[in-house]
Image (spheres, helix red, strand yellow):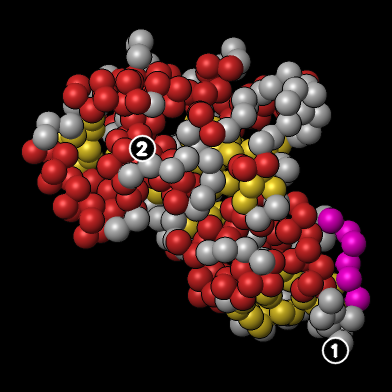
Amino acid sequence: MKMDRKDELLLLIAVSGEIPSDWIGRAVGSESYAAVLLTRLKREGEVKLRSKDGIRGYLLRNKAKQYLLVHYWDDVRLYLSGANSTNHVKSEPEKRLRLHRMSMVWIYIHRAGIRIFQSEKPKLFPVFHQVPFDSSTIIGSTPVSYYGTMEWKQETDMEIKGSRACGVLAADQFYVVYNTMGNLMKWTPKIERNLKSRLEIRLRKCRQILPGGAIIMGVGMEMVQRILISDGGLKGNLFSLDDVYESYYYIPFYTEAAIQLRLLGSETDGVRFYRFLCGALKSVNNDRFSPEAGEDENGTPVYFCYLMDLWQIKRIMSLPLRKGGRIFCFTYQAEVLRLLVPKWFQVEAIRPEKVYRYLGWRQ
């Protein structure tokens, strides 16, 4: 969808309900332009800043809502008409923070080039063998779209009340997306397991596939360490690794970390890159339950951690003392891995831009 940055920002506020004030620059792709645009939109009575309880965010005024309903009906009718949650201003801090968590995911995934608006993506749960994905929705070599929780409610009777999920990333695999921000998120395994089970039933019926795991987003790589050492907190209501999902992938809100979304979204490119790395190994381990990818020419174990599968990292941290090995990851992941694994592991960083060139992706 091609549009000017004013309309782009208004649409992002519409689907989000409320955008964190410090994310406006990311929403339009420029901090300096965002400042100019906000001044104009506030002067024209289209957006307003809400600052309460230490939480600052931008909301749509009625003038902007009417504009969007006229020009972008298909994209905003779910959010701006009727009694939907994003159409009504929230005053409770917890409800506003939930909108902020979901907004950050909307913005990050949109800036990564993934389709988020309803007019440009297929149904989340189509009738099986319905018209296939439009090839114009391709990232790398795979169609990828993102769907927020309100879209689940629209297309199904799935009850997701109480879940911390923000949405679903849909491609060759489906991933339930969460946002932990800068703290351990509240977590009730029973609720999340129920959501996953209902999603599995729907996916089996509509697409004959199963969810590929969960993606946890957060404000920085330091959250990886907090998650891996978490025991659930004093009340046992905070996130810690469990068996709800077979895999939990952590993606920080770094621009360069969008490469993880691309690799997870495209099975073809993901396998291609994996096989490229395996080409440097003397032997390859085909056991999918083992953390080792194989061994190099010296017989040293090699581990691929560039997808930030938290269970895999946890298993590496628990390996017998002094077994050691080489760990391959991306540059922005290297520092936290060096802190987590014993000193006899060698962490080797891959530059994301080199992977883009190898796979023929545009940045």
Query: What residue is disc 2 on?
Result: 12
Q: Position of residue 224 (x, y in %)?
A: 52, 59
Query: What residue is disc 1 on?
Result: 298
Which residue is at the front of the view, 87 or 46?
A: 46
Q: Is residue 265 left or right of residue 160?
A: right
- The magenta stretch is 283-288
Q: How many marks?
A: 2
Identify the mark nearer the N-term, 1 or 2.
2
Q: Secondary structure at mark 1?
A: loop
- What residue is rendered at 77% in x and 55% in y? 268
- What residue is rendered at 31% in x and 46% in y? 5
Which residue is at the front of the view, 144 or 323?
A: 144
Which residue is at the front of the view, 254 or 141?
A: 141
Q: Is residue 16 above or below residue 139?
A: above
Which amino acid does the dot numbered 2 rest on?
A: Leu
Q: Position of residue 44 (x, y in %)?
A: 11, 35
The answer to whether residue 94 is seen in the rendering is no
Q: Position of residue 280 (x, y in %)?
A: 82, 80
Q: Is residue 266 above or below residue 121?
A: below
Q: Give the prevailing secondary structure in the magenta stretch.
A: loop
The answer to whether residue 177 is seen in the rendering is yes
- Marks 1/2: CA–CA distance: 52 Å
> As drawn, which residue projects farthest toward the left?
43
Q: Secondary structure at mark 2?
A: helix
Snapshot quadrant of residue 169: top right
